[in-house]
Amino acid sequence: MRPMHLLAAAALALAAALPAAGSGFMRTGDLRVHFNALPTTELTPEVARQYGVTRSANRALVNVSIRRGEQGADEAVAAQVTVSATNLVGQRQDVRMREVRDGDALYYLGEARVTGQDTLTFTLEVRIEGEAQPMTAVFRQEFFPQ
């Protein structure tokens, strides 16, 4: 399995193990947006290094992918992805998202700061060229120091 697919597999496997609030998807017509957040320490050092992700107990990785079409015959869709994260005391941070392409796979990755045991509320906006309205979602994830 290629490293990016390892990253995606790790993110999806972890998402399945996390409470539903920490990951999810939204659908509009034939568009699906999948998203999750996980501690960067869950990535292997090799995968983190290859994709420029800082492995740290103080970092969370936000992973977003957009697909169009029926599952199994769907295609990756490019978009403008904007994410912010807010902790429980209201401190907000913009999460710089970057596009990562690996063959047919297309992901948007970003890192958020986490302080100790923390709960972050992520606000996600996805703008796809040709679509009238952006797709938006809000999800929450708890992080625990290791």
Image (cartoon, helix red, strand yellow):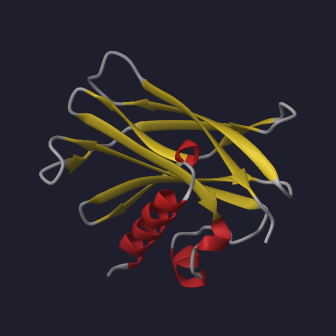
Q: Residue at x 20, y 32 (%)?
A: 30
Which is nearer the eye, 99 or 87? 87
Q: Residue at x 44, y 36 (%)?
A: 80
Which is nearer the eye, 140 or 7? 140
Looking at this rendering, what residue extends furthest in the left direction? 73
x, y (%) of residue 2?
Answer: 34, 79
Please state if 24 lies on the left or on the right of 96 as rendered.
left
Q: Residue at x 48, y 38 (%)?
A: 81
x, y (%) of residue 50?
Answer: 51, 77
Q: Residue at x 40, y 69 (%)?
A: 9
Residue 93 sits in quarter:
top right
Q: Quadrant of the C terminus?
A: bottom right
Numbered disc total: 0
x, y (%) of residue 37?
Answer: 58, 53
x, y (%) of residue 143?
Answer: 73, 56
Q: Quadrant of the N terminus?
A: bottom left
Please state if 84 lies on the left or on the right of 17 as rendered.
right
Looking at this rendering, what residue extends furthest in the top direction? 132
Q: Is residue 57 above or below residue 127?
A: below
Residue 144 sits in quarter:
bottom right
Please state if 122 lies on the left or on the right of 105 as rendered.
right
Residue 103 sits in quarter:
bottom left
